[in-house]
Image (cartoon, rainbow, N blue to C red):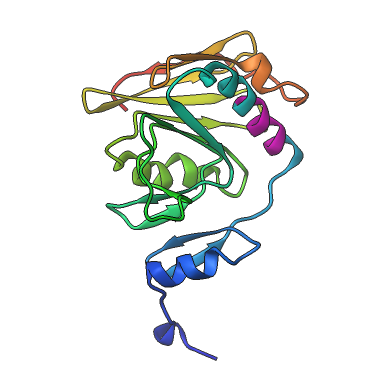
Amino acid sequence: MLSAAEKVLLTAEQYLAIERKSEVKHEFYRGEMFAMAGASRAHNLIAFNFAVALGNQLADRPSEAYVGDMRVRIESTGLYTYPDIVVVCGEPKFLDGESDTLLNPTLIVEVLSPSTESYDRSRKFAHYRSIPSLREYITIAQDRVWVERHVKRDGEWSLADFLRREESVPLESVACMISLREVYARVAVEDGPGRIDVQGK
């Protein structure tokens, strides 16, 4: 058995060769692969509801939306990951001819899980912020009505929280409006405590 000091690290090329044959999805960072856990019923419903609402509005636009299985590579940090929903406006750019690793997302959406909530809101968002093409990042709680929208304007990120089912989230990056009543359809959770707007975060 190898000690921590003898751990064998993979190259990105080795990771991709393994991942493309794997039945389980893995993130990849600094030479290591990390298996992604399965999603709950609420997680799946929310991701599907959001994707349907978004897809209906993007149907006649020069944008592509991918749900769950599109890998994204963050060039500046070396992270390979799978957002729950990712949208690219204009011509998508891929790592290679396999067209399964996107380089230029415009919008990324993550449905939060108890095991990933802190990571998705902090360190993962730090990775995402370094993507030059990214204009908007959405996180969606599954234990209560709570959507965080981060928008990049003039190089600065601003945050708005949406915490009631009667609200709709304006997605500036793709000129869409998403109803939280649609997003949380068939998900039995309570509304959040109110609305908060924070600028420059």
Q: Main secondary structure of the magenta part?
A: helix
**Front residue (pair 138, 161):** 138
Indicate left or right for 38 with 127 as reference.
right
Spot the residue most to the top: 166
**Total label count?**
0
- For image coordinates 60% across by 28% down, the residue present is 51
Segment colored magenta: 43-50
Q: Which residue is at 54% across, 64% downward?
A: 19
* In magenta segment, residue 44: yes
- Residue 114 percent coordinates (x, y): 62, 44
Q: Position of residue 49 (x, y in %)?
A: 67, 26
- Residue sitting farthest toward the bottom: 1
Q: Residue 195: x percent and y percent?
A: 51, 13
Quadrant of the rendering where the C terminus is positioned: top left
Residue 174's quadrant in the figure?
Answer: top left
Q: In terms of image quadrants, where is residue 55?
A: top right
Task: Find the residue positioned furthest to the left.
Answer: 154
Picture layout, residue 130 above or below residue 22? above
Residue drawn at (78%, 24%) of the image: 186
Where is the N terminus found, in terms of image quarters?
bottom right
Residue at screen point 40% across, 69% down: 13
Placement of 47 over or under 199, stated as above or below: below
Question: Which residue is at the front of the view, 149 or 198?
Answer: 149
Asked if the magenta segment contains residue 54, the reply would be no
Image-based side of 104 in relation to 155, left or right: right
Residue 156 sits above or below residue 36 on the image: above
User: Would you say 107 lies left or right of 70 here?
Assistant: left
